[in-house]
Image (tube, helix red, strand yellow):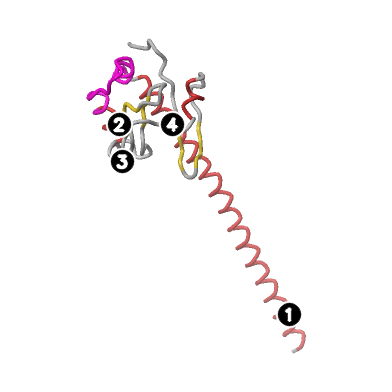
Amino acid sequence: MDQTASRNELEKKLYRSFTLLSALIIVLSLGITLYFDITRQRADMDATISGTASYIASMPQVVSMLEAGYPSALAKQDIDSLCNNLPDISVVVICDSNSLRFYHTDRLKTGETFVDGDETRILQGRALYHNRLRNQRRTEACIPRGQKQ
């Protein structure tokens, strides 16, 4: 009887240890999988944002708008349509080298000028970069002069 009771106690300990170890392995593997999945999704989002910035910078309407020095209704319409159809893009800002805004997605809530120092890196010739400011993901693209197509 004593031997059976100690055997049952040993089986219970082994069962609890195995269950705990199995749960720990499952939680650990889910954590690792979640980390790599989030990293991949962020990289995909960065690629989408960078591609969109490059596309907008190469649009003939945007180039001609900056060269003319006055906002273009056609460029505004095209960029508004692009922002409405891309779920990962929430804000697009187009400004010249003097920080004068030519386009902003939310024109009613923002002012006419944009100065925070980020534009200097772009104007120094660095084509694209990513900046994680708080929970924001950004990229900027330089539009060289004389790029009209």
Circle number at residue 7? 1
Q: Residue at x 34, y 40 (%)?
A: 87
Q: Which residues are magenta?
A: 60-77
**Badge 4: few (under 14), some or many (20 or more) residues near its Cα, within 10 Å?**
few
Write down the quadrant of residue 10 in the picture.
bottom right
Circle number at residue 115? 4
SS label for mark 4? loop
Circle number at residue 71? none
Give coordinates of residue 93: x percent, y percent.
36, 31
Residue 12 position (above or below residue 57):
below
**Residue 71 magenta-highlighted:** yes
Give coordinates of residue 101: x percent, y percent.
34, 28
- Mark 1 or 2, which is nearer the eye? 2
Write down the quadrant of residue 104 in the picture.
top left
Q: Earlier in the sequence, mark 2 or mark 3?
A: 2
- The amino acid type of the residue labelled 1 equals Arg
Q: Earlier in the sequence, mark 1 or mark 3?
A: 1
